[in-house]
Image: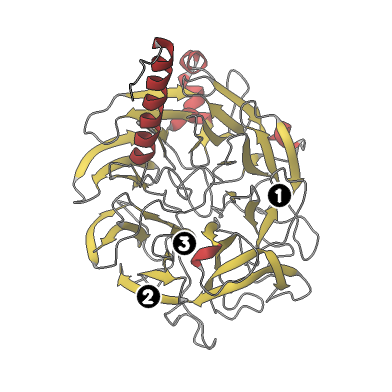
Amino acid sequence: MSHLPLPAAFRRVLITLVLVCLFTVQHSAAQTGLWASHSHDAQHTGVSSVAAQPFGKIHWQVPVDLAPPTGEIFIHYGSPLVTAANTVIVPVKTGPDKFRIEAHNGATGALLWKQSTGYTAPTAAFLPGLGPTLDGDRLLIPDNAGRVLVRKSPNFAKGKVSRLYFYGAANYLADPQAYQQNVLINTPLTTDAKGNVFFGFLAVGPTPIGLQSGLARITPDGTGTWVTVTDLSGDPSITEVSMSCAPAVSSDGSIVYVAVSSGDFGFGYLLALNSRTLAVINRVRLTDPASGLDALMTDESSATPTVGPDGDVYYGVLENPFPDHNDRGWLLHFNSDLSQQKIPGSFGWDDTASIVDASLVASYHGQSKYLVMTKYNNYASVNTGDGHNRVAILDPNASQDDPVIPTTKVMRAVITQLGRTRDPNFPTFPGAVREWCINTAAVDPFTKSVIVNSEDGKLYRWDLTTNKLSEVIKLSGGIGEAYTPTVIGADGTVYAINDAVLSAVGK
């Protein structure tokens, strides 16, 4: 059978389609293993795209604080990031109010480059960390004056550095000192799939253009916009984007979620915003599901919104009255436009929930397609707390009586795992154990496990098929500290922070 020649126009279309397909496949492959932001991605799912290596040994370590405090460490260190080429981006606190970024070879730990930043952490009981984000070949880093540093080619020793100003470079240049002294970034940065970056900022003093604390957006070409928290909330009592609350983005990129508050131990709102214009789609005042009173918002928290595969949104708050819920707070749960409040979780005050596909949990036979993983502490000596500190997998669509306030319905616990190490600080509380030390977990769907570290100084693998802690490795002697992130790198190396040191764990 003979083959007729294809018309030239058809050939051009066919070639274009092939090139698009090749680019799509290559781009997708290039992103495998990327850990781009706080809790992995713009939805804050915590789900890795590669399998975590077995816990054979600690390959290398690097300090994330060059002068950590003695005793307990109340600092939320920024999340490490990992490029698809396996470069580990490490935020490092170098002094009382100084920070830098280091890039390390993921395989060897060798230092590739350093980048200083003028970022100043806002004042808070638990010091906020430096929260960068990756976007393709760009690393975006919080700087002073509300600026964002952009370093190109983060996998290489040399990369061009530029600066973005959400309020305009010309305004900054007209009075640099005013902006340097009075504008602070107070959340980790989040980038969406189009390269737009979102973050909260504080205006702590006057600027020539009258900046007020709010939410900023900067496009890839450097165009910046911002909206005040007062305008976003419609409430003059609201003073800030909640401290350390990294904005989250819906899976289709159309909605940005962020919490705003009236300050430490004040009240607040969760906002759903148009991701292009920052116009308010909806806002909901955050309330305690047991008392009906305003939930409390604290600057000690590093909780951020998580967006589920169905678009539902999860965000942690403190209880009111405090500490009626044993200082556990609540994981509030809403549909995608925040018009419906759903079943809450029974812990949430300082945790970003992670997403677990329901098929990973062998014992689960419910109807939900995904489950929610969270810390589940029950602090000894706080109200009725017994020190039986756990992590939990929860069903977001099934309920049970709350374990502390039984008259309130909460998400049903599918499986839980009690901490392993007796807590010597509470000798009169039988069964009190050291608490799990995470503000984000790392979910490994390939080995059907979750990686978590503990204040006992150890890193654990929680096998979801057997509900057992199947692997453990010692990182330090253990220490009380603000909760820390856990990350899986491009080659499956696991990264965890304990006692102000980042450890790279693998086979």
Res. 229 visible in picture: yes
Sequence-first tag of 1 and 2: 1
Residues 211 and 377: in front is 377
The reply to whether dot 1 and dot 3 touch (C-beta < 8 Å) is no
Asked whether the beta carbons under mark 3 and mark 2 sit within 8 Å of each other, the answer is: no
Q: Dot 3 surroundings within 10 Å: few (below 14), some, or many (20 or more)?
A: many
Label 3: which residue? 438
Occupied quadrant, residue 13: top left
Q: What's the distance in space between the residues labelled 1 and 3, CA to CA?
A: 25 Å
Of 358 and 450, which appears nearest the observer? 358
Q: Secondary structure at mark 2?
A: strand
x and y, in percent, of residue 148 in the image: 44, 29
| Label 3 vs label 2, nearer the camera | 2
Q: Amino acid at mark 2?
A: Ser
Badge nearest the viewer, 1 or 3: 1
Q: Secondary structure at mark 3?
A: strand
The residue closer to the viewer here, 422 or 22, is: 22
- State the residue position of label 2: 470
Snapshot quadrant of residue 100: top left
Q: Residues within 10 Å of mark 2 (few under 14, many from 20)?
A: few
* Spot occupied by residue 327 in the image (x, y as percentages of width and height): 63, 67
Q: Quadrant of residue 152?
A: top left
The residue furthest front is 1
Q: Is there CB contact under 8 Å for labels 1 and 2?
A: no
Q: Quadrant of the N terminus?
A: top left
What residue is shown with label 1? 335
In the depicted structure, whether residue 442 falls above or below residue 281: below
Rendered residue at 68%/70% (across/down) = 325
